[in-house]
Amino acid sequence: MLNRNFESASRDYVQEIEKTLEMLLPESSRDFADGEIPGNLCRAMRYSLLAGGKRIRPMLLLAVSDMLCGSHDNALVPAAALEMIHTYSLIHDDLPGMDNDDLRRGKPTNHVVFGEGQAILAGDGLLNYAYECMLKEAMHSPAALQRSVKAISCIASAAGVTGMIAGQCIDLLSEHQVPSEEILRYIHTHKTADLLTAPLLAAAALCGATDEEESALRRYGLCVGIAFQIDDDLLDVTGDAAILGKKTGMDAEREKMTWPSLVGVEAARNESKRLWQEAEDALSIFGESAWFLKKMAENLSGRQK
């Protein structure tokens, strides 16, 4: 991508991502047609998937593909699939058995609109359909099959039972417990950082990156992910609910383990600042070609606090 204006490049990426999501998950009105997603399930899936958002994870996948391959044509379906997986995690995270939130991006959450059972199925549907889409795309390009499978494996591991799901599990088990730095780093690493590292490593796999490049991208993703989660925890303490589109103060109400609860607001801000800088430093081996990733880190670190 030759365009080096971050806002303009981001818009271009988002437009391509939205177009790909619409292509992969078009509207369905029939409930009993073999080979089609039942209409109500499709509406519930589309309700959350197309509700907006920054599309950070798919953008990262496209940007790294451009940086390493000079193109992102073969990354669009994996990028869209990754957003499906992220969306499924949000639907399930909002459920009464998890965080019990009734607002997401300023709109009623999926289970409020469609009911708890359908929301669970919408999340399940997005997770499974993501893998269907990636595998179908991989089979269409036999020459690149090994790289595609490695990319899918990166995403599956990050989203799975030793990745994001593990982080969510320990996050739930740690409610009402005395904060621990070891546990908190584990939660942040897996609940948030793994799914931000996944697009980087998936793109690296698609492009045949070197071990050194993979290591640098993994470090960048880890630092961005933990800093992002610390900032999210801070926003729950100091943010404006009207701007955020969701309730604030919920972490304290649930007695969740967060960085502010462990070290206080000011120390949490300092740790976040350190991690954002470390994320940018990790990109040094790429030189100017990593401009979008650097700008992304700057943009994310400047979220409303």
Image: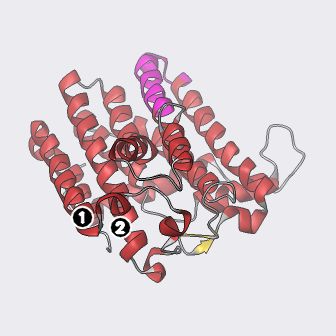
* Residue 88 image offset from top left, x and y in percent: 60, 49
* Residue 13 image offset from top left, x and y in percent: 37, 55
Quadrant where the C terminus sits is bottom left
- Confirm whether the magenta stretch covers residue 129: no
Q: Relative to 277, is 170 above or below?
A: above
* Residue that label 2 marks: 234
* 10 Å crowding of disc 1: few (<14), some (14-19), many (20+): some
Choose top left, top right, bottom left or bottom right for residue 194.
top left
Number of numbered labels in the structure image: 2
Q: Can residue 11 be seen in this view?
A: no
Disc 1 + disc 2, Cβ < 8 Å: yes
Magenta range = 139-157
Q: Can residue 302 be seen in this view?
A: yes
The disc labelled 2 sits on which kind of residue? Leu
Residue 184 - label:
none
- Mark toward the start of the polypeptide (1 vs 2): 2
Residue 269 - label:
1
In the visual, does 283 lie left or right of 156? left
Residue at the image position 31 percent from the left and 28 percent from the top: 207
